[in-house]
Image (spheres, helix red, strand yellow):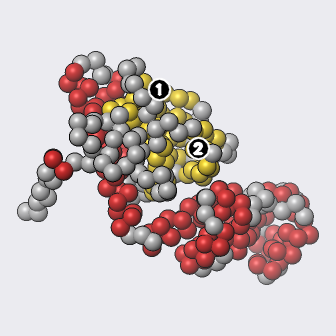
Amino acid sequence: MESHPYPDARQGIFELHARPCLASIRHVRGGRDRTSDSPDFRQSPAFLVFVIDGRGKAVVNEKTYALSEDQVLLIPAKATKSFTTDPAAPLEFWQIGIADLAIKGLPKGAFQQPEEDPLLSARETRRILLSYVRILYEFQKRSDGAHMCEAIGDLVASLVTFLRHELEERASHAPEMQDYHLGVRAKEYIDAHFREDISLKTIAKALNVNVYYLSHTFKALVGHSPIQYMIHRRMTEAQNLLLTTDATITEIALRCGYNNTNYFQVAFNRLVGMPPGKYRKTWK
């Protein structure tokens, strides 16, 4: 039978005598906020934001991060933060406040070094993280005894340790995995915003990366430049609208991000091989 030995508890990740504790836990969905706060924490907490569904943006210390499903945003203590949601796909997320966070070798109140990317993919760990946050939420509602408070503290310490493991796994595969995650994030951003007037510079700014690095990384992952991929997404959407709606060509052009109908028709003809009007008559 396969066995996995437990690590020596003396080799834990936290500073001596330091123990993180739960400051708050919120489940935000469609603008509605179910809240559970611990009234007695004494410091500005760090925050873990786990996106369940939807799209939006977070601004942390004046830096903007595009948010989408199965992402974790790690926010250090005392950071300023705000969230905006896409009305077409409202954000649903769990926000966990963690007080007294002191990890060996890191600034107090931080999950990682300041220069590291605070967005972590949870695509492969979604089930594990959902288990953590749901149990924490239920435990917090019943935290009226010493034993329950101790259990909550153990869960928080375990959750932070798990996140540190994921961060170290990401770092051990750098730069290949960093390039991969950047490409995935860029693709997700374009999928969410291709109907808008965006450019390569817009995408790079939203992801906080260099324009040329983004273009090279994205093309290596997808096989097209970001702008070529955006055009493909627009034309796929246009084809769908032509076949499933009675919207005019001008209306479809606007819905797909084109203010100039003639330019839209030229782009459609170049990519699809026929003008949009002929495509509708041929296939509808």
User: How far from the left and from the top, in percent, is residue 79?
Assistant: 53, 39
State the residue in front, 201 or 223: 201
Res. 41 visible in picture = yes
Residue 87's place in the image compared with 244, above or below, is: above
| Quadrant of the frame with the C terminus | bottom right
State the residue in front, 98 or 249: 98
Mark identifier at residue 35: 1
Q: Quadrant of residue 151?
A: top left
Horizontally, is 220 left or right of 235 in the view?
A: left
Mark identifier at residue 256: none
Horizontally, is 93 left or right of 251 in the view?
A: left
Q: Quadrant of residue 134?
A: top left
Q: Indicate the amino acid at tag 1.
A: Thr
User: How far from the left and from the top, in percent, is residue 172?
Assistant: 35, 67
Q: Quadrant of residue 243?
A: bottom right
Badge 1 or badge 2: first in the primary sequence: 1
Horizontally, is 73 left or right of 165 in the view?
A: right
User: How far from the left and from the top, in percent, is residue 196?
Assistant: 76, 56
Q: Indicate the amino acid at tag 2.
A: Asn
Instruction: Give me the C-alpha separation between circle 1 and circle 2.
Output: 24 Å
Residue placed under numbered mark 2 in the picture? 61
Instruction: Report helix, strand or loop for mark 1.
Output: strand
Q: Residue at x 71, y 60 (%)?
A: 202
Q: Residue at x 49, y 48 (%)?
A: 73
Residue 193's place in the image compared with 224, above or below, is: above
Estimate how packed mark 2 is, as few (under 14), some (14 to 19) or many (20 or more) residues with alpha carbons within 10 Å. Answer: few
Residue 2's place in the image compared with 20, above or below, is: below
Q: Nearer the viewer, mark 1 or mark 2?
A: 2
Horizontally, is 89 left or right of 41 in the view?
A: right
Q: Residue at x 53, y 29 (%)?
A: 33
Q: Residue at x 85, y 69 (%)?
A: 264
Instruction: Report helix, strand or loop for mark 2.
Output: loop
